[in-house]
Amino acid sequence: MAKKELLPADAAAADEPAGKVRQILAAARHLFLEQGYGDTSMDAVAKRAGVSKATLYVHFESKERLFAEVINQARARLRDAIVAIASEAHSDPVETLRLIGLQFMRFVTNHDSLTLFRTVIGETRRFPQLGQTIFQTGSRDLLELIATIIGDAAARGELTVENPRAAAAHFVALIKSDLHLRCLLVSFYQAEEADIRRNVEAGVAVFMSHYGPRDPRPDAARPSA
C-alpha cells in the first residue's frame, strides 16, 4: 500500500505532539475497523499515520495500549454526553435515566462500536490481556460514572439505592436487554431509533419499579378505607 499523503493542514498538525497522537489514533482506528486487531501491525499504523515507528512507540508502548486508547477515545464522547445530562437540572430521575439510556444505547449499537466490540471478543483468546485492558480502561469507568449519578439521585431522595454500583450494572443490563446482543450476532441487523427508545423506556420502567423512591409514611401502603 502506498504511503498515505498528508494534507497541508494535517502535516502542520502532526508537527505538534498532540497532533501526532490524533493522527496515530485516526490511522489506528481505520485499520482496526478494517482489518481487526490481530491483522493490524504497528508498522502499518505508523505508515498510515505518516510517522516513524519510533514516534509511534513514544506515544503508545504496545498495540494493546493503542487499541485501548482507540476504544477510550470513542467512549470519551459518550462520557461527555452523560456528564452533560447529569449536570442539567432534571427534577425527574426518570427523565435523567431515559436520556442517559438513549445516549448509551445509541453508542453501543452504532456500526463502529459494534465492530470494535466484536474485535475485542474475537481476539481475547489469542490476546487474553486485551479484554481485561479494555474493561479496566473504559467499561469500568463508564459504569462508575453511572453509579455516581444514581448515588447522587439516591442522596436527594429520588431513588432508593443501597449499592449504586450494583444498581448501575442493573440499569445497563435492563436498557441493553437482548437488543445489543442481537446487533452483535446478527451482522445485517441495524437497530432503529424506535428499537432503542423502546428498550430504554422498558428498562427505565423496570429499574424504577425496584429502585424508585419509597413513601416513608408507615400507612402509605395501606388501602384507604
Image (cartoon, helix red, strand yellow):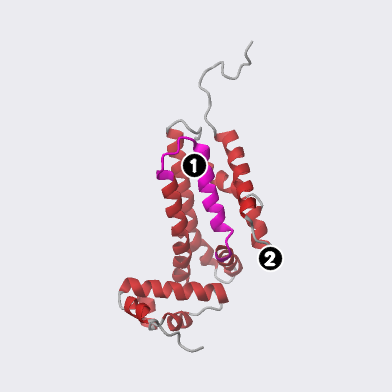
39 lies left or right of 47? right
* Viewer-proximal residue among 22 and 123: 22
Q: Nearer the viewer, residue 144 or 79?
A: 79
Extent of the magenta region: 86-112
Q: CA distance from mark 1 to mark 2?
A: 32 Å
Residue 72 in picture, x, y percent from top left: 45, 62
**Which residue: 45% across, 50% down?**
82
Q: Position of residue 174 (x, y in %)?
A: 61, 45
Give the quarter of the image for residue 223. top right
Residue 36 appears in the figure:
no
Element class at badge 1: helix
- Whichever of labels 1 and 2 marks the residue nearer the N terminus, that label is 1
What residue is disc 2 on?
188
Under tag 2, what secondary structure? loop
Q: Quadrant of residue 114?
A: bottom right
Amino acid on which the number 2 mark rests in the picture: Phe
| Location of mark 1 (residue) | 96
